[in-house]
Image (spheres, rainbow, N blue to C red):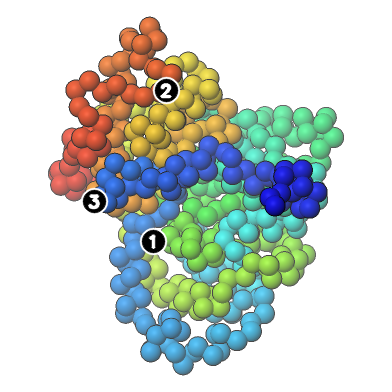
């Protein structure tokens, strides 16, 4: 006998029967489209290419080389088996001392050694997702709110709100000033929350930005500190993309700002970090809360029991990040390769008149396709997105899923694939844009956009377009100069 919806609601909790996870967002729908038809160069060359996953796979050769040279770092090898028992038995929630020391040292290096971090303030969690929820539990009660500049990472709605009951209030940012957060916008969002009787407990920022790929300048960071200090609310800084900045302006951590001659209650400042983006280790689930508030550190450490990093992972990470020569080489090579890949994508798009927001960090670009919209609405953005997913076979993420206030923006990830797949993806985008440009006039007469949103390619079959080589090959002098 099956359960009806009514029976489920009676037998299960509101959380189990609700949709607070946000899995019905277009952001996650794109992943489902990829999972049902994933691209493979030989087994499924016409499948969907995953450009919705912000993952750094460009330096795994360096990781693999280090692992082969340091077999003792793993307790599951002949060279490391002597450590097996000590690592496998019970460990408390503080974490291995060598792990916390290594992470603190790595955080300093990824911030240009401009600041140092205290290992005793390192609290581990199950990835940045767990770290964000942990800090939300520590700082706010159900019904309280955090201000968040838009556009912001879609997972924040889940991470900070699903189980905590915390609200996220958007802070308006516009493309006219490159989506920079302003004091006026912060004040407006705060005042509106006050009028709505919502208690604002903090401001959440992402630096470098996801999805913009931009970094906050010193003046803006100082302004944010002044704002939270004046309002006596917390500042949570997501800095998980710290080492992905590949050109000027350089990344400035909030940890550096509060060391300056500036009025600031450090008890209000907290950093979320992980190794998922900078090192490309999302599967290791290494999340970090670093707080300047002793009470938050103590509470978070107790809460970390619900999402600890395995000691086997801690042991490996401690060994790897304690190798300063390797870390320095990895950070430098990662930045170099991210820069080359970013240039390859943005220059390829520019050749067909498609621009991206100017950026110098992250694992993605913020692509502007508003000229391809049938009309300047979010409905038209979703129609275009469906075409890109189901016809062009690319999983890019629509701006509306990031709470972007303007239609036509898309986040495109570029570091989670090899060079050949990147070229195929770029060819698909370029071909689609060129075909769309040719069809502008017919579209105005409503002959181009059909109800089923299928594209009509007059000269070439879609299967041929998907696999065709790009105009600029990876071996061209320009591409070689960028690597």
For the image, the number of numbered tags is: 3
Q: Which residue is mark 2?
A: 452
Determine the secondary structure under disc 2: loop
In percent of the image, x 56 and y 78: which residue is there? 311
Q: Which residue is mark 3?
A: 42
Label 2 neighbourhood size at 10 Å, few (<14), some (14-19), many (20+)? few
Q: Which residue is mark 1?
A: 331
CA gap, disc 2 to disc 3?
29 Å
Among the two numbered marks 1 and 2 on one chain, the one whose residue lies closer to the N terminus: 1
In percent of the image, x 35 and y 68: which residue is there? 63
Q: Are marks 2 and 3 in contact (CB under 8 Å)?
A: no
Relative side of 365 to 205, left or right: left
CA gap, disc 1 to disc 3?
33 Å
Among the two numbered marks 1 and 3 on one chain, the one whose residue lies closer to the N terminus: 3
Label 1 neighbourhood size at 10 Å, few (<14), some (14-19), many (20+)? many
Q: Are marks 1 and 2 in contact (CB under 8 Å)?
A: no
């Amino acid at each position: 006998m099956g359960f009806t919806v009514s029976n489920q609601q009676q037998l299960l909790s509101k959380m189990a029967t609700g949709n607070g996870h946000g899995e019905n967002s277009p952001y996650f729908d794109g992943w489902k489209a990829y999972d049902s038809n994933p691209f493979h160069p030989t087994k499924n060359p016409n499948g969907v290419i995953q450009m919705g996953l912000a993952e750094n796979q460009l330096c795994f050769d360096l990781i693999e080389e280090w692992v082969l040279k340091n077999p003792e770092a793993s307790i599951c090898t002949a060279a490391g088996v002597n450590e097996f028992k000590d690592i496998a038995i019970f460990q408390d929630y503080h974490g291995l001392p060598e792990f916390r020391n290594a992470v603190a040292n790595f955080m300093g290096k990824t911030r240009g050694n401009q600041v140092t971090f205290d290992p005793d303030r390192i609290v581990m969690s199950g990835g940045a997702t767990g770290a964000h929820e942990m800090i939300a539990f520590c700082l706010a009660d159900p019904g309280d709110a955090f201000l968040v500049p838009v556009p912001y990472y879609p997972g924040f709605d889940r991470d900070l709100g699903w189980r905590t009951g915390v609200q996220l209030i958007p802070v308006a940012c516009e493309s006219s000033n490159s989506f920079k957060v302003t004091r006026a916008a912060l004040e407006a969002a705060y005042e509106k929350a006050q009028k709505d009787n919502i208690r604002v407990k903090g401001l959440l920022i992402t630096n470098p930005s996801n999805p913009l790929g931009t970094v906050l300048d010193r003046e803006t960071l100082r302004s944010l500190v002044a704002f939270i200090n004046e309002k006596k609310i917390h500042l949570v800084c997501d800095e998980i993309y710290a080492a992905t900045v590949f050109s000027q302006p350089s990344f400035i951590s909030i940890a550096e700002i509060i060391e300056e001659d500036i009025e600031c209650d450090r008890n209000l400042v907290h950093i979320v970090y992980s190794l998922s983006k900078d090192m490309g280790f999302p599967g290791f689930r290494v999340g970090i809360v670093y707080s300047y508030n002793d009470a938050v550190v103590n509470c978070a450490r107790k809460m970390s029991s619900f999402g600890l990093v395995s000691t086997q992972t801690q042991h490996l990470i401690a060994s790897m990040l304690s190798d300063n020569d390797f870390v320095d080489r990895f950070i430098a090579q990662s930045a170099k390769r991210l820069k080359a890949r970013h240039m390859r994508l943005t220059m390829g798009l520019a050749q067909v008149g498609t621009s991206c927001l100017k950026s110098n960090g992250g694992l993605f670009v913020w692509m502007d396709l508003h000229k391809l919209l049938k009309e300047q609405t979010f409905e038209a953005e979703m129609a275009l997105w469906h075409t890109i997913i189901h016809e062009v076979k690319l999983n890019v993420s629509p701006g509306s899923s990031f709470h972007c206030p303007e239609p036509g923006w898309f986040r495109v990830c570029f570091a989670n694939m090899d060079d050949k797949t990147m070229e195929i993806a770029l060819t698909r985008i370029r071909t689609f844009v060129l075909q769309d440009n040719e069809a502008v006039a017919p579209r105005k007469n409503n002959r181009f956009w059909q109800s089923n949103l299928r594209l009509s390619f007059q000269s070439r079959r879609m299967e041929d377009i998907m696999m065709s080589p790009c105009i600029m090959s990876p071996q061209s002098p320009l591409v070689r100069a960028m690597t």
